[in-house]
Amino acid sequence: MKHPILTAPTPDRAATPSGLSSLAGRSVLSLCDLSATEIRAVLDLAKSLKRDYAPWRTAMSQRSAVLLFEKPSLRTRVSFEIGIAKLGGAMVFLDHQNNPIGERETVSDYGRNLERWTDCLVARVYRHATLEALRNATRVPVINALSELCHPCQILADALTLEEHGVDLASMRLAWLGDGNNVCHSLIELTAIFGGSITVITPRGYEPCSKVVGQAQAAAAATGARISLTNDPAAVRGADAVYTDTWVSMGQQKDAAKLAAMQALQVNADLMRTAGSHTLFMHCLPAHRGEEVTDEVIDSNRSVVFDQAENRMHAQNALLLLVLGLA
């Protein structure tokens, strides 16, 4: 039996963007599960939370979330745990780094047990299929806290960060350098949904998933977004933000050939000069300083990496309130 929907105090609800109820009860496994209007609702609510959590301090009273983590984490775990506490909710962390979800019992049985106790599942997994199995088996929302395919919570925080620094999502110009990984996929999806442009710069053989790109191109036809793939680092010229990530993702083995191929895409002072004097530097962290980015860049006043990290909590809290029907 579900808990009755709790309401936040009247003053803050009056200031909350309209149309939020469409997310109630929904799972979010990728940004493609959200419309531009719904992402806008998340971002506007996140801004409200960031200004003042006091009106929302009991919003999740008698509500709970379970965090299922197969991968190590700093930002994701801490931002969810502290964020839920700020909203007055309960949280249980289940460490699956040594026993993958589905190993001890089926993913379906596991999820069907958890849904009897909790209101939401937040899962950080190796295989996106695990998220899909949890969603299909349970009646509570499932939120993707990272999979090998995408990282929607990170990109919601990044969208919030871009707007805070004066970048309009509908006309943004992003440049991605490095591996065409999960974060890259979600940035491509964000661009396709809002209508800006992204140039993905990778070595040959390390391009983003063609299926993800194809789906984004189809969505871009309706929004006017531009998605370009190239191997030329000079394509960063004119970007509002240059974004990179570790060259070897969690769970992957160090590959000397891959690292060698990536060297030309290091984000350093020369590359940032090519991008332009106004260009921001972004990274989802953790950073391997001296590999994908130099100290000079990540510690510069153009770097917004710690704004991104902080905004994880606000964006995730907004998403939680919406999928739980509390805003």
Image (cartoon, rainbow, N blue to C red):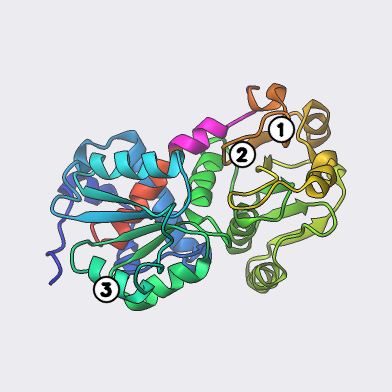
Residue in the picture at 22% in, 43% down: 56
Amino acid carrying mark 3 in the image: Arg
Please state the extent of the stretch shown in magenta in the rendering: 301-310
**Contact (Cβ within 8 Å) of mark 1 with mark 2:** yes
Mark toward the viewer: 3 or 1: 3
Identify the element where label 1 is drawn.
Answer: loop
Residues at badges 3 and 1 in contact (C-beta under 8 Å)? no
Of residues 51 and 305, the one nearer the viewer is: 305
Q: Secondary structure at mark 2?
A: strand
Pointer 3: what residue?
A: 112
Q: Are marks 2 and 3 in contact (CB under 8 Å)?
A: no
Q: Is residue 242 left or right of residue 259?
A: left
Q: Circle 1: is it few (<14), some (14-19), or many (20+) Cα within 10 Å?
A: many
Are there few (<14), some (14-19), or many (20+) residues within 10 Å of tag 2? many
User: What x and y, as percent, mark residue 42?
Assistant: 40, 53
Q: Going from the N terminus, do you reach mark 3 or mark 1 first?
A: 3
Q: Is residue 3 above or below residue 156?
A: below
Q: Residue at x 71, y 48 (%)?
A: 176
Residue 196: in magenta span: no
Q: Position of residue 81 (x, y in %)?
A: 31, 43
Label 1 amino acid?
Answer: Val
User: Label 3, label 1: how many angstroms apart (C-alpha)?
Assistant: 43 Å
**Corner quadrant of residue 123:** bottom left
Q: Which one is in front, 62 or 100?
A: 100
Residue positioned 34% across, 63% down in the render? 19
